[in-house]
């Protein structure tokens, strides 16, 4: 299933701001097992000063089990 960039961005925003535990419960109840590919692990707040974006870019996903299905789904 492919979406245009704007639609995908809206869904990614909704997933990023969702409650990870509630989302996981609902996904399990619906037996949703989305396929995904891990591109990289979520960022570490301790490393906020490093990288090309410095302090101005913070990762939205704090827990890996929340980030995995949300960030890699295509």
Image: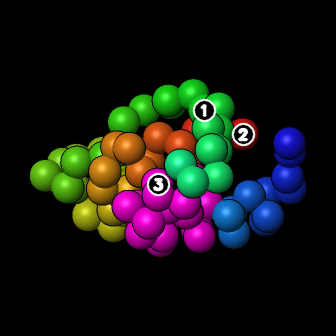
Report crowding for label 1: few under 14, some 14 to 19, many 20 or more residues within 10 A (C-alpha): few
Q: Residue at point 61% right, 60% down?
A: 12
One can see residue 71 in this view: no
Mark 3 = which residue?
A: 24
Q: Is residue 17 magenta?
A: yes
Q: Nearer the viewer, mark 1 or mark 3?
A: 3
Name the residue beneath numbered marker 2.
74
Judging depth in this view, the residue of 21 and 7 nearest the camera is 21
Considering the whole magenta stretch, tell me its main secondary structure. Answer: helix
The quarter of the image holding the N terminus is: top right
- Residue drawn at the location 30% of the way across and 56% of the way down: 62
**For the point 78% across and 65% down, which residue is it?**
6
Q: Is residue 16 above or below residue 52?
A: below
* 74 lies above or below 45: above
Residue 32, quarter of the rendered image = top right
Report whether residue 28 is seen. yes
| Marks 1,3: beta carbons within 8 A | no
- Distance between the alpha carbons at the discs numbered 1 and 3: 15 Å
Relative to 14, is 2 on the left or the right? right
Q: Which residue is mark 1?
A: 36
Q: Position of residue 40 (x, y in %)?
A: 42, 32
The magenta segment is: 12-27
Q: Which residue is nearer to you in this view: 37 or 21? A: 21
Q: Residue at the far left: name it.
A: 46
Q: Secondary structure at mark 2?
A: loop
Residues tagged 1 and 2 counted as in contact (Cβ below 8 A): yes
Q: Is residue 53 above or below residue 64?
A: below
Question: Could you tell me which residue is drawn at 79 percent across and 64 percent down?
Answer: 7
- Residue farthest to the front? 29
* The image quarter in which residue 41 lies: top left
Quadrant of image for the C terminus: top right
Q: Secondary structure at mark 3?
A: helix
């Amino acid at each position: 299933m492919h979406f245009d960039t704007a639609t995908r961005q809206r869904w990614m925003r909704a997933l990023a701001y969702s409650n990870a535990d509630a989302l996981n419960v609902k996904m399990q109840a619906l037996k949703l097992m989305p396929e995904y590919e891990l591109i990289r692990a979520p960022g570490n707040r301790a490393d906020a000063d490093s990288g090309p974006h410095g302090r101005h870019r913070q990762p939205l996903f704090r827990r890996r089990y929340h980030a995995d299905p949300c960030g890699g789904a295509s």
